[in-house]
């Protein structure tokens, strides 16, 4: 029983580590695709558009990691590897979807999403992030 608890604890910590790394990568992705300093825009300037964009990205990454963990192998190393790979795939697809949305809409989407005034495009982009996560999750089942 104690050995099982130790094994499960190691698994939880390992998968949590993968999730945190992927969320950091998601933060970096949003920071790269939007002009300016994302940390400053959210925590100092309280930019709601940037906040919704980052929050949707982090939620989408969490959803993908959840699905990857749920579908993973009983082998810890294989499960962690698959979770990381699927998380990276999700981030790549979110980035591609952002670029495609930017091409299909007027203006420069990254700049629009960090404007001071609330902009409805942020909700479309947020929905795109969640939709991408759902597609990746479906691919895991």
Image (spheres, helix red, strand yellow):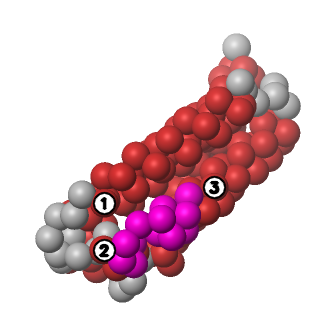
Q: Residue at x 81, y 25 (%)?
A: 74
Q: Report, in whole angstroms, how far the alpha carbon at label 3 lies from the one at label 1.
A: 19 Å
Residue 104: give x, y in percent of width and height: 48, 65
Q: Mark 3 points at which residue?
A: 93
Q: Residue at x 21, y 70 (%)?
A: 47
Helix, strand or loop: magenta stretch? helix
Q: Mark 2 points at which residue?
A: 112
| Camera-side mark, 3 or 1 | 1
Q: Report, in whole angstroms, how far the alpha carbon at label 3 lies from the one at label 2.
A: 21 Å
Kind of element beneath mark 2: helix
Label 3 crowd (10 A; few <14 / some 14-19 / many >=20): some
Q: Which residue is drawn at 80% across and 46% down?
A: 81
Q: Name the residue under label 1.
A: 121
**Dividing the picture into quarters, in which one does residue 133 lie?**
top right
Residue 37: give x, y in percent of width and height: 36, 83
Q: In which quarter of the image is the C terminus?
A: top right
Of callouts 2 and 1, which one flags the residue occurring earlier in the amino acid sequence? Answer: 2
> Which span is picked out in magenta?
97-109
Q: Report, in whole angstroms, how far the alpha carbon at label 2 lies from the one at label 1.
A: 8 Å
């Amino acid at each position: 029983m104690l050995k099982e608890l130790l094994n499960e604890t190691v698994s939880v910590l390992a998968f949590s580590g993968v999730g945190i790394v992927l969320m950091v990568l998601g933060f970096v992705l949003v920071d790269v695709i939007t002009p300016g300093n994302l940390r400053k825009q959210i925590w100092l300037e309280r930019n709601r558009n940037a906040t919704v964009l980052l929050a949707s990205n982090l939620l989408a990454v969490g959803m993908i990691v959840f699905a990857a963990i749920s579908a993973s192998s009983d082998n810890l190393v294989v499960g962690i590897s698959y979770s990381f790979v699927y998380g990276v795939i999700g981030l790549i697809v979110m980035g591609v979807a952002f670029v495609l949305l930017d091409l299909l809409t007027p203006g420069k989407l990254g700049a629009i999403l960090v404007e001071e005034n609330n902009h409805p495009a942020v909700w479309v982009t947020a929905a795109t992030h969640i939709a991408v996560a759902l597609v990746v999750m479906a691919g895991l089942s």
